[in-house]
Amino acid sequence: MLSLLIYRKCTMKDSWFLYGSLVVSLIVMRVPYIGQALRVLNTMVHESGHALAAIIMSGKVVKVELFANLSGTTHTVNSGKLATVVVGLTGYFFASAFAWIASLLVSDSMGRWLIVLLMAMAVINLVFYVRNGFGMLWLALFIAGCGLILSKGGNELLHFVAIVLMVLLLVDSVMSAIELMVISVKTPGKAGDASMLAKTTGIPPQLFALIFVGIAILAVADAIIRFFPSLKSLF
């Protein structure tokens, strides 16, 4: 009986910490400049997905660019039409999958490894691919911040930072896909990956954008169902 009571108190504490951190994260995302700077994280993950797909498909990554307006580009040389389609599809898919993995790591109290993974991704991008000024500066600051937190932060700070990063990835994986959907309807020729895929396949960009939105929502919904504690555990 005593062990069950202790377990219940721990669960309640963890749940309050998680949901409290979620609220703080959402507020931070709305802070001018700071929130936008943090949201470049999803752009890095998205463009890394393109780069990884190009390498797997025997292509070449020429360069990656990250911009302050949350956009990004990955310039690749692909081995054929199939490779071009795979590379085009992978950005949004990879961002959604990584957000799901982030939720898994945080739920298993492995937030440290989420920070390590993102830091490693940033290092690879800075060393090999990103060459535009803003992108290099953002990556350098992100790497320095992650290194400082990993070396000096206690367990609670690490867990909080991991939750913030997870929320950024979850929210932006959906929001970026929805924004693409809106652009594909208003200006189909300027819908990024969806426009490129439309030119390659002849399929309307709106359909690709809709697929990206669906995948993102499914990934986030599954992550919430699987890894987020029930709100009942707060009481």
Image: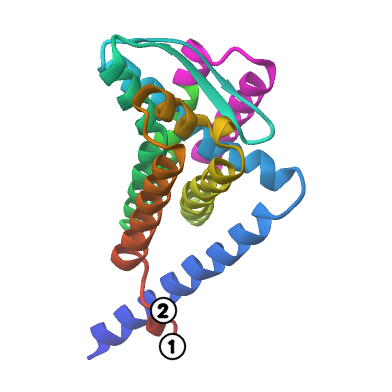
Please give the label number shown on residue 186.
Answer: none
Could you tell me the amino acid type at mark 2?
Met
Look at the image and tell me whether residue 113 can be seen: no
Closest to the observer, 210 or 87: 210
Query: Please, is residue 225 above or below residue 50 in the view?
Result: below
Question: Which residue is pictured at 37% across the width and 53% down the height?
Answer: 214
Task: Give the structural element (helix, strand or loop) at label 1.
Answer: loop
Disc 2 marks which residue? Answer: 12
Q: Residue placed at 43% from the left, 72% from the top?
A: 15
Q: CA distance from mark 2 to mark 1?
A: 7 Å
Is residue 10 among what the camera can see? yes
Placement of the N terminus among the 4 image quadrants:
bottom left
For label 2, count other residues whose C-alpha is less than 10 Å away and answer few (under 14), some (14-19) or many (20+).
Answer: some
List the residue tagged with mark 1: 235
Query: Residue 174 at what x, y percent from top left?
Result: 48, 51
Number of numbered discs visible in the structure rendering = 2
Q: Are marks 2 and 1 in contact (CB under 8 Å)?
A: yes
Q: Which residues are magenta?
A: 124-153
In percent of width and height, residue 198 lies at 42, 30
Q: Main secondary structure of the magenta part?
A: helix
